[in-house]
Image (cartoon, grey):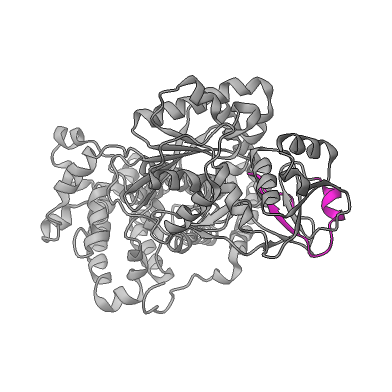
Amino acid sequence: MASKPGILTDWPWKSLGSLKYLVLAPWVIHSTYSFVTKDESERNLSNLLIFPFLLWRMLHNQIWISLSRYWTAKGNNSIVDKGLEFEQVDRESNWDDQILLNGTIFYAATVSKLLPGTLYLPAWKTDGVIMAILMHAGPVEFLYYWFHRALHHHYLYSRYHSHHHSSIVTEPITSVIHPFAEHLVYFILFAIPMLTTSFTGTASMTSFFGYVTYIDFMNNLGHCNYELIPKRLFSIFPPLKYFMYTPSFHSLHHTQFRTNYSLFMPLYDYIYGTMDKSTDELYETSLKREAESPDVVHLTHLTTPESIYHLRLGFASLASKPHTSKWYMWLIWPLTLFFMMLTWLYGRTFVVERHRLDKLRLQTWAIPKYSIQYFLQWKIESINGLIEEAILEAEAGGAKVLSLGLLNQAKELNRYGELYVERHPKLSVKVVDGSSMAVAVVLNRIPKGTTEVVIRGRVTKVAYALAFTLCQRVIEVVILREDEYVKLKKSFNSKSETKLSFSRSYAQKTWLVGDGLDEEEQLKAQKGTLFIPFSQFPPKKLRKDCSYHSTPAMVTPRHLENLHSCENWLPRRVMSAWRVAGIVHALEGWDEHECGYTMSNIEKVWQATLRHGFQPLMFPTQSKY
């Protein structure tokens, strides 16, 4: 929102929320019905194609969003090296409003037959395409330049344009984040080539749809925060610098504000003396910038088929919220299936996001495999191969620590990461499974004064450590299943096992739960029971009369930069304990692996974590079921 919002700031359909797409429904139904019912000679193909074209525009923008986030995650050729925040992601989440506006106007114009020559548009007219190019290069670019300069006058800037400039670090969709009134003026400007070709009888579907696609492409290009225009392009044709801007050119407008006003052609900045003096220098610097070498790598993987949309590289609005299943995801199941096949075939780990904590450079890498594949015996070798390659790549890049997230550390897969240390005994990068951190988080979530707890779930390294530590603290540990009790009892000495018992009373009010907790057991728990997960994945929340903690996690320090997406199902600015463990390991400079059946000192890890600004996520989350 602008600092002093002016009239027509809000979009007309703002109150509709996610139902705003219904604005287009009457137009889409009418155009489809007319095309089906009318004779072939009277069918208006261009009107029918408006809706598919709007879908193409949304896909086009999403491609730019994903590519830009992938490029900036690697760090090479990035222009502005500052972090994004959740506030910017929220502010820019309505980037599709301008597409709805354009679609509504296009439909209204064709149905009302206001524009001559647009009732039955041909696919191509050469003279119309040339005219559209000339009208853009002349009137549109010229008028935009002066309108843009006017928007930087303090009166209009404070009421309108400051909303756009709230984003110093731009993303492709930043290009269309403006108040409603501003977009109306832009539409009038960009309509000049279309109106001209309409009134001269030279309009075509190519001149209309192609021109709008060109605007989208150049807008996304200028705001992607990644310099991708090769220098040789300007060497081959030097005058091109007057007719085509670069991402670094427009980035300077967002950091300097009073320079580089041009739309897509810097010509008018050269003519009127508003070209930023550092334009060429920033362009050269950005092209030479190399990919960032991380100090800490967190290795994760995809979970459910739709989880790819919740990655930072996916849908920005979904990535900025905890992962929950959405009913409308089934509408794009063909695309989901395509991505599943793509990741199935793609055999290389990819960079998901990049952060900075003090001087520590952090990256998250993802294995292109889904959770279900980790339970397939015939996929174990290939997954281990990918993890091993990632470890060696991190080693070659100078990383200090690599932490294993989710199922990348499963006992059945690699014995909590021990397999890789055995294969490469001289590894300088420290492999961390984060078990001690997970145990510390769970122990500090148990309410004070608790005298007995239930431990239920698959017996893992974390479960062993929890049971042992609680018994040492003279807290009764109740096991509900005999096989789990036997496994734990065998690992204990005679003193600690006295606090370990097998019972099916379900009377305890504090449950530590892992994978394998079934619905029947959960329903037998007492009213008011507190469920505290110790596993990587959360249990299904069935009870409205009980409380549920998140999986082991910590709130990050406020000075952790570039954190604008949620880690799986965790709240904003919260990281899993396994991910935090790797960061703390590097901050403390600990020179040993934490994998296999070895664990770090739990209290030492906990105190170090608090000392570095991480805070407990203390309040349990209530079930939404």
Q: Nearer the viewer, residue 393 or 214?
A: 393
- In the rendered structure, the answer to whether residue 94 lies left or right of residue 199 reads right
How far across and down, in percent of the image, does residue 390 sit? 45, 29
* 535 inside magenta stretch: yes
- In the rendered structure, the answer to whether residue 397 lies left or right of residue 622 reads left
In which quadrant will I find the N terminus? bottom left
How far across and down, in percent of the image, does residue 175 sit? 37, 56
In the figure, residue 516 lies in which quadrant? top right
How far across and down, in percent of the image, does residue 107 sit? 53, 58
The reply to whether residue 117 is in sight is yes
Q: Kindly identify the residue that appears in the image at 57 percent across and 31 percent down.
A: 596
For the record, the magenta segment spans 518-540
In which quadrant will I find the C terminus? bottom right
In the figure, residue 19 lies in which quadrant? bottom right
- In the picture as drawn, the residue positioned furthest to the front comes out as 495
In the figure, residue 525 lies in which quadrant? bottom right
Q: Nearer the viewer, residue 410 or 393?
A: 410
How far across and down, in percent of the image, does residue 55 sit? 53, 48
- In the rendered structure, the answer to whether residue 165 lies left or right of residue 471 reads left
Q: Is residue 292 above or below residue 158?
A: above
Q: Nearer the viewer, residue 92 or 555?
A: 555
Q: Is residue 569 above or below residue 159?
A: above
Q: Kindly identify the residue that appears in the image at 47 percent across and 58 percent down.
A: 610
* 108 inside magenta stretch: no
